[in-house]
Image (spheres, rainbow, N blue to C red):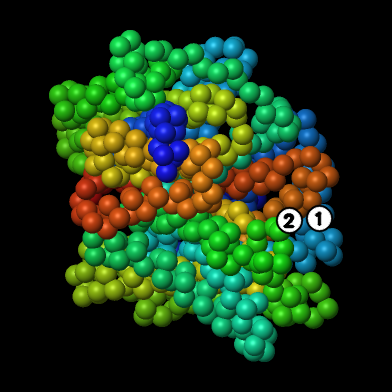
Amino acid sequence: MSDLFSDVFLGALFFGAITAAIPLLLAGLGEQMSEKAGVLNIGIEGMMIAGAYAGFLGAYYSESLWLGFATGAFGGIVVASIMVLLCVRFGLNQIVIGIGLTLGFEGLTALLHHFQFSRTYPRLPAADVTVVPYLSDIPILGPALFKHHLVVYLAVLLVFVLAFVYRRMQLGLNLQAAGDKPAALDVAGVDVVRTRAFAVFTTGALAGLGGAYLANIGAGIFVPFITNGAGFLGIVLAMLARGRPFWVLCGALLFGVCLSLTTALQVAGINIPTDVIQMIPFLAVMAMLIMFGRKSSLPAALGIPYERGAR
Amino acid sequence: MSSETGSATQGQMPLKKPGSAIAHRLVLTIGPILIALILGGLILLALGVDPIKYYGYVIQRGLLSPTGIQQTLTRMAPLLFLAAGLIVAFRAGVWNLGADGQFLLAAVIAAASAPYLADFMPSWLAVIIAFVLSTAIAVIWSLVPALLRAYQGVNEIITTLMMTFLGVSLANVLVKLVFLDPSTTVPQTRTLPVADRLPRLFDTTISSGLIFGLIAIVAVHLMMTRTAFGLKLRIVGANTRAAVHSGLSVPHLTVAVFALSAGLCGMAGAIDILGVQGNVRADWNPAYGLTVIPMVFLARFNGFASIAFVLLLSVLSIGGESAARRLGVPTVFTLLLVAIVLIVLAIAEYIDHRHNQAAKA
């Protein structure tokens, strides 16, 4: 047992937890904004995989991780623009289009990858880390939490920025109104379609960024279907967080620890099938839903396209 | 093309003949499929594959060659059950996205129980008991999201998705730890001998599961359209408040919908194992459920139309699997094609809807 809880093991566990949590955090924050504005974004998995592929290509050819993040976010925005056009502008069924986008971009990225790299999986060089002075000197936790790529800190910072936007800014109020009572927002002179489009575009950028992080830093390579449900986990996080960005962070860290435990235990030589550990976060969430599942935790107009003048 | 658009505009006339309405529907359905096939062809062209050769090969191997068509028809069996399960749920306004988890768990239970039972009872009885058992497991698996939705109002999209992740992992755990076949090194369940599986139809290799699948989907269609119970479910789906006001017990009906839907998805898993696969290997997950969802949408939750779309999906996937080996186009192209069809069809519906509104105004 002493072996299991050695410093190295704990360090690797927490480091891995952060790495695994960041894509979920970004996806969760993005989904949260969409849902706040009344768009149930099932296509987020497609946005993430598009971001992962575009981000990987960007980083691979430019040899710059930052450019990779930019292309990743752009990849997510491209998928989001389809969603905006079809679901926000045209008001088509969000679940149908969402599933279509997820399937389509999982297929498209796998297909493109096959024709581009065939069966080779080129690896990106390890990412530069930004070491936070002093804090990283804390034993065990320091190196695990404060020696990450700069984008990790920015993602955590985004939690607080979004919390501020939702609580203190007109934009946050507009987003909330677009999800709860779009007609009221319309009467107040704010364009519902534009507000919702803004939310979905932001979701695309965040999900694409999360996908790019997953491929470029989390894995260092792109393999087809690499997101493996991370987008859906983002939806779960957003649903559980009930509009609070900070809760998304907590949930993402919880999931991150569970995901990291899978690899860490294997490294430590404990022979449990990974499937058992992979079940833990979902079991935790189901337990939370059973205990705290209450009605009306979601925006009233979630999933309903806005049509001016409709009853 | 002009004759098609002609019949389409006729179809929007009020007091139309039923024939022209069907023609209108056909145009609205076949048109998007053709457009999607062309778009898919353009993608192939961009990747340096001859689309005509690809589609020709897919049709040849999925539909026209004797082995191909038999494989295609066999593949249809589980897909039909899944389509039936999804139609029940979607028509009743329940977004059961957990079909894959229900499918896989039932498959594992079927694969675990059938060879064991066949040791000490006639194989036909073993197959029937395994079928019932695995269906029951799928129903039980859906109870958590069902009760949460019915009594707590928790969104079933999220819960069923999560139950799918859980179910896939649990199925793997069961295969690797509990139902492992000790006689092989490959992690898999015991194998049901071919002789004990569902009989094949006549002299072909088509599994009789196809017949059961067809019965299931027609039965579901008739239940939803022709019975009082189906009407109740549709009312719940169309307007929950109206259902409450007309005295329907919405929670009970919701649980019933989940049970029916998950049961049919479980039957899909059972029929695939008992008819075709014979065992479940570790990490086996065909993820049929996610690809059947678009088919059901394309069919507008109509059982008979679903049969046609499931056939199309089977042809595309069986042909696509052959083409992957021969032409080097990975099978994921089928996934992409399905997605394009779905999106193009949604756009076509929108244009048609706007056109109708403009005609009324």
Q: Image height check: is A267 above or below B292? A: above
Give the distance between the C-alpha atoms of the residues marked 1 and 2, in whole angstroms. 7 Å
Query: Relative to A106, does residue B301 appear above or below in the rendering?
Result: below
Q: Relative to A190, is A104 on the left or the right?
A: right
In this rendered view, identify the residue nearer to me: B227 or A111.
A111
Q: SS at mark 1? A: helix
The kind of residue on which mark 1 rests is Arg
Q: Nearer the viewer, residue B154 or B361?
A: B154
- Mark 1 / mark 2, whichever is N-terminal: 1
Q: Chain of mark 2?
A: B
Q: Position of residue B39 (x, y in %)?
A: 65, 38
Q: Residue at x 72, y 63 (%)?
A: B184
Residue B305's label in the rendered image is none
Q: To which residue does mark 1 refer?
A: B61
Residue drawn at point x = 70 percent, y = 46 percent: B331
The furthest residue to the front: A2
User: Residue A35, percent across and down?
Assistant: 30, 39
Residue B354: horizontal and vertical position, in percent? 42, 44
Location of residue B29 with respect to A305 vertically, above or below? below
Q: Dot 1 falls on which chain?
A: B
Number of numbered discs: 2
Q: Position of residue A259 (x, y in %)?
A: 44, 40
User: Which amino acid type is marked by label 2?
Assistant: Ile
Circle 1/circle 2 CB separation < 8 Å? yes
Dot 2 corresponds to which residue? B318
Q: Is residue B144 visible?
A: yes
Residue at left 29%, top 36%? A250
- Give the quarter of the image for residue B139: bottom left
Left or right of residue B83: residue A296? left
What is the secondary structure assignment of the residue under circle 2?
helix
Q: Residue at horizontal 56%, vertical 36%?
A: A226
